[in-house]
Image (cartoon, rainbow, N blue to C red):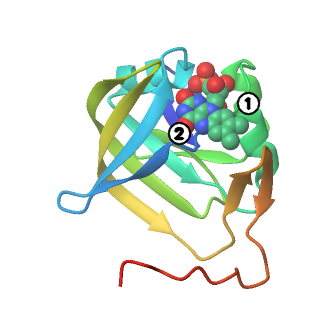
Amino acid sequence: MVSAFGGPEPAGATASAVCSLSLEPMMMLVCLDHGSRSLAALQKAGRFGISVLGVGQQKAAEVFATKLPQADKWSTVAWKEHLGVPIVEGSLARIVCGLGDVLPGGDHVIVTGTVIEVEAEPGEPLVYHGGLFRALDAEPGIGIERTDG
Ligand SMILES: Cc1cc2nc3c(=O)[nH]c(=O)nc-3n(C[C@H](O)[C@H](O)[C@H](O)COP(=O)(O)O)c2cc1C
């Protein structure tokens, strides 16, 4: 979940296009649709948060994927302001980033962010696969032999 304060109200969107970009300096990458209100908010704020949701936070993932008024989205979760960004409480990892570049990427933009702070704790991540939110398989996965030596 990507979030920012574009004004007094928090904004947030469920996003799967989120990954690490650089170790030194530590940077993250997020891809957001041109029409995302959270994109407008983070551009205004100059910083953004990433809340990595865990199993049990499916409701939040679903709500933040909607175009409901932002206040309605945020009323469904426990959250706090931390270092100037709204963060979902109970997430597995909470990352605060300063806004870097906003680069073209088709109907999305590629947003880079310099990491200001990371907090993380152990837990089961919420994954999205086959059109559904789910937990990782509790059974060990099938071994896929690597061919790159
Ligand atoms: C599993 C999932 C992953 C998504 N990933 C992205 C994403 O990476 N980038 C994006 O812009 N929208 C993504 N979306 C769609 C946004 O969550 C959706 O457009 C949301 O309404 C945007 O809210 P906003 O306009 O308040 O920012 C995803 C939706 C789902 C269900």
- Seen in the picture, residue 38 relative to 31 is either above or below; the reply is above
- Seen in the picture, residue 1 relative to 43 is either above or below; the reply is below
Q: Residue, x 17% and y 61% (percent of image)?
A: 24
CA gap between label 2 and label 1 equals 13 Å
Looking at the rendering, in which quadrant would you find the C terminus? Answer: bottom left
Q: Is residue 120 left or right of residue 131?
A: left
For residue 134, say whether it is visible. yes
Q: Is residue 112 left or right of residue 107?
A: left
Three-letter residue code for mark 2: Val
Label 2, ligand 1: CB separation under 8 Å: yes
Q: Are marks 2 and 1 in contact (CB under 8 Å)?
A: no
Q: Which residue is mark 1?
A: 73
**Residue nearest the viewer, comparing 1 with 34:** 34
Q: Please state the horizontal and vertical placement of residue 86, each as a whole percent of the image.
A: 53, 40
Q: Residue, x 69% and y 57% (percent of image)?
A: 127
Within the image, what quadrant is residue 61 found in? top right
Label 1, ligand 1: CB separation under 8 Å: yes
Q: Which residue is mark 2?
A: 2
Three-letter residue code for mark 1: Lys
Instruction: Look at the numbered disc 2 and give the secondary structure of its residue.
Output: strand
For residue 9, say whether it is visible. no
- Quadrant field for ligand 1: top right
Q: Residues within 10 Å of mark 2 (few under 14, many from 20)?
A: many
Q: Residues within 10 Å of mark 1 (few under 14, many from 20)?
A: many
Total marks shown come to: 2
